[in-house]
Image (cartoon, helix red, strand yellow):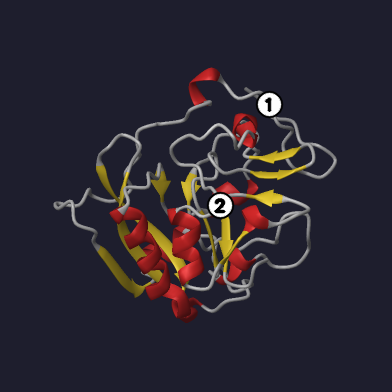
Amino acid sequence: MSFRRGPDGFGIAHRTPKVLRDRRLRSIDVLAPPDTERFTSSITRVPSRVLKRSTWSRECPVARDDLAYLTMSFWGFDGAHHSGEMIVNRSVAHDIVSVFRTLHRNRFPLEEMRVTTRSELDAPPTGDGNNTSAFVCRAARLSDEWSEHAYGLAVDVNPFHNPYVRDALVVPELAIAYRDRAWARPGMIRPGDVVTRAFAEIGWHWGGAWSSVQDWMHFSRSGS
């Protein structure tokens, strides 16, 4: 399926394929699966090999040494245990681990957790992305200002299940079926659920509570 861009530069939304209307795909591992069902995590300086494949450059608004590399275990939609990776601002690393520890304890399913690559920034819209991630050196949507993701101070959770919606704009472009928030499906974020409570406990704000736009995937420290 090809995706044309609209006047705003974003892909034009398409009808969600039947197989993705209740999306429960098997996780793609980027790290070796954990050898225990207990939650495991690590916080380190971002390795050079990881930084190289990330979106970071010297033009980004955050220094390399102000970022941290996390590994965390999570439950997939396949019911299996997986290990993921994430780059965040070093100042919030322990808080983010605590959030995902809570999600793991409650078996909230994630499909994918990996570092966003540079090639993804310039790639044409594909409409089906579902990567739970944090640091991405890019501007905010429909803005010339840096996104909170560019500082490592925002996290997107299951973007396909929790799309960004503003009028006719839907990101990811195939996630139109998930505009229907009354149809509760695994992986969705809902007011007062375990995900919103976990982020609220560290003082972060949810884009699903905004009025002019719904960014159901998005949590940030500043609320933007």
Give the mark count.
Answer: 2
Residue type for callout 2:
Pro
Using the rendered view, name the quadrant where residue 59 is placed: bottom right
29 w.r.t. 39: above or below: above
The residue that label 2 is drawn on is 191
152 w.r.t. 206: above or below: below
Residue found at x 27% / y 37%: 79
Q: Nearer the viewer, residue 11 or 54?
A: 11
Q: Quadrant of the C terminus?
A: bottom right
Residue 83 x/y as whole percent: 29, 52
Residue 3 x/y as whole percent: 69, 29
Residue 169 x/y as whole percent: 75, 40
Q: Nearer the viewer, residue 49 or 179?
A: 179
Q: SS for tag 2?
A: loop
Numbered mark located on residue 14 in the image: 1
Label 1 to label 2: alpha-carbon separation: 26 Å
Tell me: 54 left or right of 33.
right
